[in-house]
Amino acid sequence: MRHPHTGCPETMRCILAVSGTLQQGFPLRKNLDAPGKPAVHLGSGLVRGVRSYLDVKERGCREFGNAPNPACVVTGRESDGNVYELYLVDGAACLGALLGEPRFLAMAPDAVVLDLDAAETCDAVRKLARHVLGDAAVRRCSVLAVVSAAPAQPSFVRTPSDRSDGVTSFAAGALLARERGLLAPTSEPANAWLGGRGARLNARLSDP
């Protein structure tokens, strides 16, 4: 059935790629569930054309004190890659998943490329993508993904990787960042160039 006003299907499922606190085992995973329609985890996949950062919240911002969240900046470069987790999500949950949540994040339908040939892309995701596209030989496709709506910010710390090709993943990268002391809001990498300007601007915008 279609909605009487919008003409859109009343029930619609989307394949959504997420990296960070929306994925399994993290606090915002519940945002992907609609009432009576829980999201289904499809598996992991390597997304190319994004560079992953961790947003270390500066003092004075809305989320100061919260754990850093990832911000995958779209670069379009083949050498930049991040392992995402893919879910089948109800359209209503998809629309509301980022409301009031970590800053700078947005969803884009075709800004990045899912590499179906990559070892990091699980077989279930590979088979589903090829089935949906009707092409058993397709090697890459676009996918709806959570990405950063802003270029790299002064509060962004590059997500570390222990791989020679620099490919990142949120859970492993966040652990490495903690071990290396990169996540303190007063650390030099996080607050370089800020000079308090971000805090003053945020306070000004929040004034009644």
Image (tube, grey):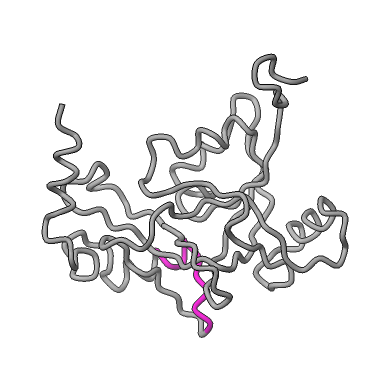
Q: Quadrant of residue 130?
A: bottom right
Q: Residue 168's x, y, as percent?
A: 50, 70
Residue 62 vs residue 161: left or right? Answer: left
Give whichever of 85, 157 is nearer the camera.
Answer: 157
Q: Going 37% across and 70% down the picture, which residue do you hit?
A: 158
Q: Where does the magenta region start and end?
A: 165-174
Q: Residue 104's x, y, as percent?
A: 38, 49
Residue 85 vs residue 12: left or right? Answer: left
Q: Quadrant of residue 63?
A: top left
Give whichever of 81, 207 is nearer the camera.
Answer: 207
Q: Is residue 149 above or below residue 135?
A: above
Q: Residue 59's x, y, as percent?
A: 16, 51
> Would you say residue 167 sits in the magenta stretch?
yes
Which part of the image, by quadrant, shows the N terminus? Answer: top right
Q: Residue 171's x, y, as percent?
A: 47, 61
Q: Is residue 199 above or below residue 163?
A: above
Which part of the image, by quadrant, shows the C terminus? Answer: top left
Q: Going 69% across and 14% down the picture, which residue do you hit?
A: 4
